[in-house]
Image: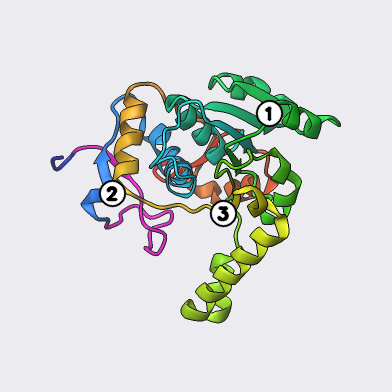
Amino acid sequence: MNVGDEVWGALPPHQQGCHAQYVIVNKSLVHKKPCNLSMVEAGSIPYATVTAWSVLKITGDLYWTSSKGKRVLILGGSGGVGTAAIQLLKAWGAQVIATCRGDAVPFLESFGTDSIIDYTQPDAEKQIRECGKYDIILDAAGLGADVGPNYADCLKDWNLSKFITLRSPMLRNVDEYGLIMGMMKNSVDLFTTNVKTGVTSKSSTLRWGFFLPLSEAIKEITSLVEEGKICPTVEKVFPFSELPKSYERMKAGHLRGKIVINIDEE
């Protein structure tokens, strides 16, 4: 990379920089921006897609095992992480089943999702089970570990299958109990949750997924974008002056991709 290059990347969660015009970041977490993306489009991809990459590759063990032929259920497929996960999995050769509201079905079809289930339909749970059992169930809707028991019977038996949720008490425990005691409580909470759900009885596990900014993730995502295998999914662009409105839209839920703040537009 050279001075003046357009770049993209991701900051570690402990660093400052939210909505900043300039940030300092380790060069390993920065790559040249794909030339087939505008700045606004590029701004919609790294964080959600790196989150999906780290959750699937690291938490879901797909870094060490082949994704080809794996069956993955994504709960909440139309949001930022959900759409990123679908595109990554399809690029890796997995079979993807996703849930969303009925109006988002064409949106998910555009990514090549193998089966789409409208979760508002009364027989949605039946449809999920009729699609077969899954190697990974990714809760991208923020339902939390409490819904794990509802899907325990949907995980493949004796296959090290996983239910992964992006909603965990980790940060809350650390804030409340401090780093050491908080991490100890996290371990107890995760163990207790696994026992309560009953998923461990047939070698499955319930896991917490996190955003992990890794150079390898950003490098692979850059290549997939350049190849057209990952596309930006921008629901709306807000000028910086309408920052509060963007958060109101986020809180309302049922997003179709990402919300982008254009810091250069007032």
Residue 132 image label:
1
Where's residue 179, x and y in %? 47, 77
Secondary structure, mark 2, is: helix
- Please tell me in which quadrant of the rendered image residue 158 appears: top right
Q: Cα distance, mark 3 to mark 1?
A: 21 Å
**On residue 22, which mark appears?**
none
Give the camera-side residue of 201 and 4: 201
- In this picture, which residue range is highlighted in magenta? 5-24
Q: The N terminus is located in which quarter?
A: top left
Q: Which residue is mark 2?
A: 29
Using the image as rendered, state which of residue 182 and residue 35 is in the foreground.
Answer: 182
Q: What amino acid is found at the position of numbered circle 2 in the picture?
A: Leu
- Do the numbered discs 2 and 1 sit on residues whose CB atoms are within 8 Å? no
Q: Position of residue 112 (x, y in %)?
A: 54, 19
**Pointer 3 residue:** 207
Left or right, residue 77 beside residue 128 = left
Instruction: Report the amino acid beneath label 1.
Output: Gly
For the residues carrying marks 2 and 1, which lies nearer the camera in this image?
A: 1
> Most extreme residue toward the right, as rendered?
122
- Helix, strand or loop at label 1? It is loop
